[in-house]
Image (cartoon, rainbow, N blue to C red):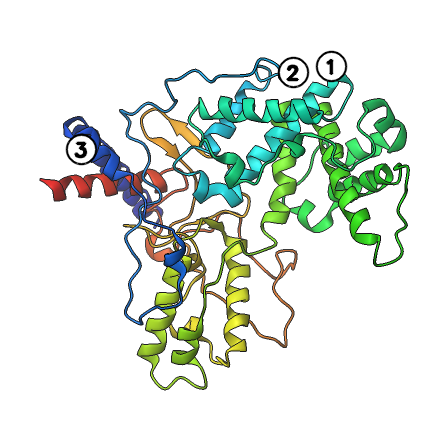
């Protein structure tokens, strides 16, 4: 059995090398216009989500994982124009900045925004300000410097290949570099207010899986932020519905200050791992998809299913619109399946249409040519850049976990429930064992796509 798997792996790697050879050869023969057309994405405008969906509508072709050509430069040729007034040390965080530019590479930034790009960008801002506090003694920037520095950060990242609209994609503002409503920003006052040794012990090293359930570090951060918020000249009472929202906002602003202090006590790489681990806990809690109008599905599947084919056509058409939005993790897909199922039940769809129409978790993520669905692991790694294969990221192309139909009589499934077993990187199905591995899956997809398109053009 193991020999068979090994043989399959060798064959797939041989095909990979052949495909990459032909892809590179074709690239040498293609014109710049052909190259540009190869990377055009389908339109994701507002009309893509209109409710007027015919049962036979098919998803438009989409190729989200096509990496840049091995012959194409990764970085921009222009030198970023910096203000020269920002005190943040970009040089000391050079490797962090490069990793952020790869995670937010221009073509993929909107697709990886929710899971990889924006969490990495937010972590970068926290680390840059936190590291600078070792020189300035302050855990924030004033509004003037914040505006200058944010512009410099955006220019520096764009100069290494990142998108030039990350502020819009990730909802970043100059206020993200200030203390906002938190009353404490000086390092000395911070350390005199909170139990800094306990905070560092709780967050210096976290288990990215256990932390989401045990919340040891998150609890320490919340406690420290609450202590900082109470230092305001007009301390807000925890009682009463009118003052609670304002107090909650102040505590949240202070949490950012706490994270910056933590980042100042760790090296940039270690700080990034901690911050991304904490962010993953929040990322996996909610479904990021926007559900368009589902009346068409309700008309085809509601009040008992009289025609299974019509119902499943309507479901396939509806799900195809979800597949144009973004890449998601397997835990997010689980939440999306639950959310959609509950909405469908409100339209009097009582039968399990997921099982009836063979809807799986991967059907909720972005789709494309030669791609039957990509779910990112619940603990997503950074994207990587290689001068031969371009930008790549890990996803599992063989994850066929059936989408669970929600049962109102049962509590929603939770990743902290010990009976729930959804791995960070789903395993390949038995029928395809050894066909993809976590390092070769995306590369093989890219090479196959390019080779087939090349053959079609000859």
Which residue is drawn at the image coordinates 56% and 33% (left, top)?
121
* Foreground of the two, 260 or 19: 260
Question: Residues at badges 2 and 1 in contact (C-beta under 8 Å)?
Answer: yes
- The span from disc 2 to disc 3 (Cα, nearest Å) is 48 Å
Q: CA distance from mark 1 to mark 3?
A: 53 Å
Q: Is residue 405 visible?
A: no
103 vs 171, left or right, is: left
Q: Residue at x 35, y 66 (%)?
A: 317
Q: Which percent across, then down, holds residue 379?
A: 55, 44
**Callout 2 secondary element:** loop
| 174 relative position to 80: left or right | right
Q: Position of residue 151 (x, y in %)?
A: 55, 25
Q: Quadrant of residue 126?
A: top right
Label 2 or label 1, whichever comes before in sequence order: 2
Residue identified by numbered label 2: 87
Q: Secondary structure at mark 3?
A: helix
Question: Local crowd at mark 3 within 10 Å, few (<14), some, or many (≥20)?
Answer: some
Pointer 1 residue: 135
Which residue of the protein is positioned furthest toward the left in this rendering?
458
Residue depth check, mark 2 versus mark 1: number of the one nearer the observer: 2
Q: Is residue 86 visible?
A: yes
**Residue 187 - label:** none
Image quadrant occupied by the C terminus? top left
Separation of residues labelled 2 and 1 (CA atoms): 10 Å
Q: Which quadrant holds residue 274?
A: top right
Residue under circle 3?
A: 22
């Amino acid at each position: 059995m193991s020999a068979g798997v090994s043989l399959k792996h060798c064959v797939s790697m041989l095909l990979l090398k052949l495909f990459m050879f032909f892809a590179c050869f074709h690239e040498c023969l293609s014109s710049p216009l052909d190259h540009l057309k190869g990377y055009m994405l389908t339109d994701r405008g507002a009309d893509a989500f209109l409710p007027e969906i015919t049962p036979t509508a098919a998803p438009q072709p989409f190729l989200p994982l096509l990496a840049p050509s091995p012959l194409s430069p990764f970085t921009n040729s222009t030198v970023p124009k910096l203000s020269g007034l920002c005190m943040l040390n970009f040089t000391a965080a050079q490797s962090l900045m490069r990793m952020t530019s790869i995670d937010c590479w221009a073509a993929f930034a909107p697709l990886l925004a929710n899971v990889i790009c924006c969490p990495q960008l937010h972590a970068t801002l926290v680390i840059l300000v936190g590291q600078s506090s070792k020189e300035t003694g302050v855990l924030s920037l004033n509004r003037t410097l914040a505006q200058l520095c944010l512009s410099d950060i955006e220019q520096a990242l764009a100069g290494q290949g990142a998108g030039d609209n990350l502020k819009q994609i990730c909802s970043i503002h100059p206020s993200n570099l200030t203390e906002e409503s938190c009353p404490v920003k000086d390092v000395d006052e911070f350390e005199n207010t909170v139990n800094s040794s306990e905070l560092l012990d709780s967050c210096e090293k976290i288990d990215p899986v256990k932390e989401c359930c045990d919340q040891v570090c998150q609890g320490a951060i919340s406690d420290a932020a609450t202590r900082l918020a109470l230092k305001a000249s007009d301390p807000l009472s925890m009682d009463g519905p009118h003052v609670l929202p304002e107090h909650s906002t102040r505590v949240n602003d202070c949490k950012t200050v706490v994270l910056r202090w933590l980042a100042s006590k760790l090296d940039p790489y270690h700080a990034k791992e901690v911050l991304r681990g904490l962010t993953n806990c929040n990322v996996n809690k909610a479904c990021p998809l926007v559900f368009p109008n589902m009346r068409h599905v309700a008309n085809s599947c509601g009040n008992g299913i009289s025609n299974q084919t019509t119902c499943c056509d309507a479901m396939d058409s509806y799900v195809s619109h979800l597949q144009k939005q973004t890449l998601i993790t397997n835990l997010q897909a689980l939440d999306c399946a639950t959310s959609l199922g509950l909405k469908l039940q409100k339209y009097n769809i009582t039968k399990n249409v997921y099982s009836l129409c063979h809807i799986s978790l991967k059907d909720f993520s972005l789709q494309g040519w030669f791609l039957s669905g990509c779910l990112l692991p619940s603990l997503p790694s950074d994207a990587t850049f290689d001068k031969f294969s371009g930008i790549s990221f890990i996803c599992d192309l063989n994850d066929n976990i059936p989408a669970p139909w929600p049962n109102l009589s049962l509590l929603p499934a939770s990743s902290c429930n010990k009976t729930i077993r959804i791995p960070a990187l789903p395993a390949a199905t038995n029928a395809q064992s050894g066909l993809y591995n976590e390092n070769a899956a995306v590369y093989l997809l890219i090479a196959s796509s390019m080779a087939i398109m090349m053959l079609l053009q000859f």
